[in-house]
Image (spheres, rainbow, N blue to C red):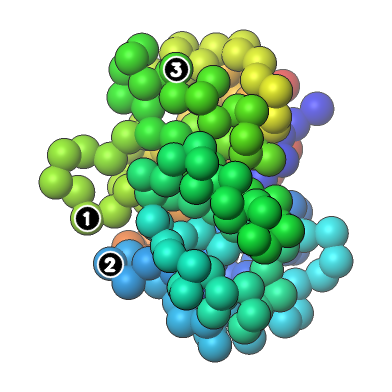
Amino acid sequence: MGATVKICGLSDPQHVGAAVTAGARYLGFVFFPKSPRNVSVGQAAKLMADVPVGVAKVALTVNADDAQLDRIVSGTVVDMLQLHGSESPERVAEVKARYGLPVMKAIGIAGPEDVGLIDLFAGVADQLLVDAKAPKGADLPGGNGISFDWRLVRRKYWPCPWMLAGGLTPDNVAEAIRLTGAKQVDVSSGVESAPGIKDDGLIAAFCAAAHAAN
């Protein structure tokens, strides 16, 4: 039994279609101006319009205030909010209560000292995204194409579902799943031909590898 796939950072209808065809169960749309994958609320609404039922549309934000989240939630048909900044457990709870949508909290991991953060958020978030911590001075909190030592989360179990991210590619995703036992995986830069430009062939290859992983 392979892993469920999230393709993140989608900004073109063709690649949305490719992700759906390849069997991705989550599609991520980035609302963060510094990212080459950033989309406006209007763009996201159009991209989400044809996504079939059963494929979750995820809005990725970074330390967003209520005003920004209000615009996203009112202007699109988003199914889940992904908080990818330095949001506290209290902020996660606030967002859940305000919008009534599932919330995925991203946790950046660089070393053993970071793993405790997962426990901190596991009781409040609906899902966790366990990602590589961004390098110091990086403009982006994720999507940097770097990974962390997967052994740090090997066969870990938390109160809510979790998703492995950070430096995954069609070539290494099966090994990452084998090492960690992850049931869900997330990819962005690993299926791109250039920053922010998805590649249909890489999307298909990644999904195939993740679905076939044991």
Measured Cα–Cα span from mark 2 to mark 3: 28 Å
Measured as percent of width and height from the top left, residue 91 is found at 50, 47
Measured as percent of width and height from the top left, residue 78 is found at 68, 68
Depth check, front residue: 28 or 192: 28
Measured Cα–Cα span from mark 1 to mark 3: 24 Å
**Disc number for residue 116:** 3
Three-letter amino acid code at the position of disc 3: Gly
Q: In the figure, residue 160 lies in which quadrant?
A: top right
Using the image, determine if residue 208 lies above or below residue 25: above
- Give the tally of numbered discs: 3
Would residue 69 be seen by someone viewing this image from the given angle?
yes
Depth check, front residue: 69 or 199: 69
For marks 2 and 3, the one nearer the N-term is 2
Is 20 left or right of 35, judged from the image as shown?
Answer: right
For marks 2 and 1, the one nearer the N-term is 2
**Crowdedness of circle 1 by 10 Å Cα count: few (<14), some, many (20+)?**
few
Measured as percent of width and height from the top left, residue 61 is found at 46, 60
Depth check, front residue: 174 or 94: 94
Using the image, determine if residue 130 lies above or below residue 59: above
**Crowdedness of circle 3 by 10 Å Cα count: few (<14), some, many (20+)?**
few
Three-letter amino acid code at the position of disc 1: Asp
**For discs 2 and 3, the disc positioned in front in the rendered view:** 3
Dot 3: element: helix
Tell me if label 2 and label 1 are in contact, CB under 8 Å: yes
Measured as percent of width and height from the top left, residue 205 is found at 60, 48
Determine which residue is flagged by label 1.
Answer: 139
Tell me the residue at 42%/45% (across/down): 87
**Crowdedness of circle 2 by 10 Å Cα count: few (<14), some, many (20+)?**
few
Tell me the residue at 54%/20% (across/down): 119
Measured Cα–Cα span from mark 2 to mark 1: 7 Å
**Disc number for residue 34:** 2
